[in-house]
Image (tube, rainbow, N blue to C red):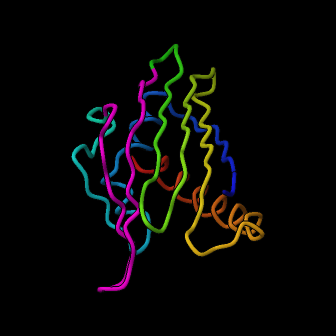
Amino acid sequence: MADFEVHLDPPLSAPEAWKRILDLTAHTAVIPLTTVTGDAMAARDLVDGSRFVARTGLGPIGFDDVMVVDSVVAPTTTTAGRARIHKEGKVVRGAIDLVVTPTDAGSSVRWTQQIGVRGVPAVLDPVVSRIARAAYGSTLRRLLARG
């Protein structure tokens, strides 16, 4: 598994940053060639056990990134929020830990992830880590910029 972390300090309150990051409908809008579906699509609706799927592809060619929320506690203006999500798809495996903490300037977002891609040998984990960090960092910045 490749490991990476993205850390951002948006000028948004912790609850607002959380809401934007976990708005799964927005993921469809900002991630190219990807559509997210699930039983809960807004941050406020996610609960332990919520399942969602990010389908990435072009026409009939693609793959499903199946995810399950292990735990979720939303932040407040004074306390950190945390979410743990694991991936159980056939192509992409791993786990995500999201922590959103209130700060004097807005909030601190820390996205830590372990990711494994079927068929990609462990020797390439450093490459996977760099690519994933760049892709997820870009996605998080776009999600946070959405009003």
Place of residue 90 in the rendered image (x, y in percent of width and height, measured from the top left):
43, 66
Task: Left or right? Give the position of 105 relative to 49.
Answer: right
The answer to which quarter of the image holds residue 30 is bottom left
Residue at 43% across, 54% down: 88
Residue at 46% across, 42% down: 85
The answer to which quarter of the image holds residue 35 is bottom left
The number of numbered discs placed on residues in the rendered structure image is 0
Task: Left or right? Give the position of 111 relative to 144.
Answer: right
What range of the chain is rendered magenta? 47-75
Place of residue 50 in the rendered image (x, y in percent of width and height, measured from the top left):
30, 40
Q: Is residue 69 magenta?
A: yes
Residue at 48% across, 17% down: 77
Majority SS type along the magenta span: strand
Q: Is residue 30 magenta?
A: no
Q: Is residue 57 above or below residue 52?
A: below
Please name whichever residue, 71 or 18, is drawn nearer the observer in this view of the structure.
71
Q: Is residue 33 above or below residue 133?
A: below
Please name whichever residue, 89 or 46, is drawn nearer the observer in this view of the structure.
89
Place of residue 82 in the rendered image (x, y in percent of width and height, measured from the top left):
50, 28
Residue at 73% across, 64% down: 125
Name the outermost residue toward the left: 39
The quarter of the image holding the N terminus is bottom right
Place of residue 123 in the rendered image (x, y in percent of width and height, measured from the top left):
78, 69
